[in-house]
Amino acid sequence: MQRVEVSFVGTPPLLQVKRASGVSEVEVNGAILRCLVCGSFQPFLEALRGHEVISLKSTSTRGEGEHAND
């Protein structure tokens, strides 16, 4: 699973991304879209088609919460 943050020129494609297979926890703040992608990135990338992306950052969620009691 990957935590993804994408910056767009203009409005992010919220509905297309929400409908993409394997995508969850979609939120938009201005021109920035954040979500989780589980499995293949292909449906997520297809949802971005036709929208100009300025930056895309993907971070593995592996290990999140493992040290919550430390």
Image: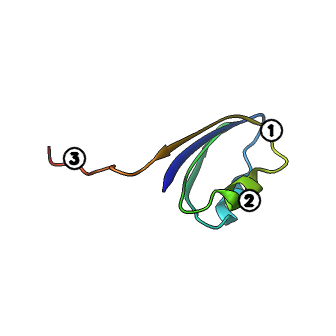
Residue underneath mark 2 = 16
Residue contact between numbered discs 1 and 2, judged by CB atoms under 8 Å: no
Q: Position of residue 13 (x, y in %)?
A: 74, 51
Q: Of callouts 2 and 3, which one flags the residue occurring earlier in the amino acid sequence?
A: 2
Front-most of residues 4 and 60: 60
Q: Which picture quadrant has residue 5? A: top right
Q: Quadrant of residue 16?
A: bottom right
Q: Is residue 31 above or below residue 23?
A: above
SS for dot 3? loop
Q: How many residues crowd around disc 3 within 10 Å: few (fewer than 14), some, or many (20 or more)?
A: few
For the residues bearing labels 1 and 3, Cβ distance under 8 angstroms: no
Question: Where is 46 relative to 70, above or below?
Answer: below
Query: Which residue is painted at 76% across and 57% down in the image?
Result: 46
Q: Quadrant of residue 41?
A: bottom right
Q: Are marks 2 and 3 in contact (CB under 8 Å)?
A: no
Report helix, strand or loop for mark 2. Answer: helix
Q: Give the vertical position of 20 relative to 55 (above or below).
A: below
Labels 1, 3: front one? 3
**In the image, residue 60 lies at what x, y percent?**
46, 47
Q: Residue at x 80, y 38 (%)?
A: 52
What's the amino acid at mark 3? His
How are the colours assigned in the image? rainbow
Q: Which mark is residue 7?
A: none
Front disc: 1 or 2: 1
Give amino acid for label 2: Gln
Residue 23 % position (x, y)? 59, 61
- Nearest the viewer among 15 and 53 is 53
Task: Please name the amino acid that badge 1 sits on.
Answer: Glu
Looking at the image, the residue that sits furthest to the right is: 50
Residue that mark 1 sits on = 52
Spatial CA span between label 1 and label 3: 37 Å
Front of the two marks 2 and 3: 3
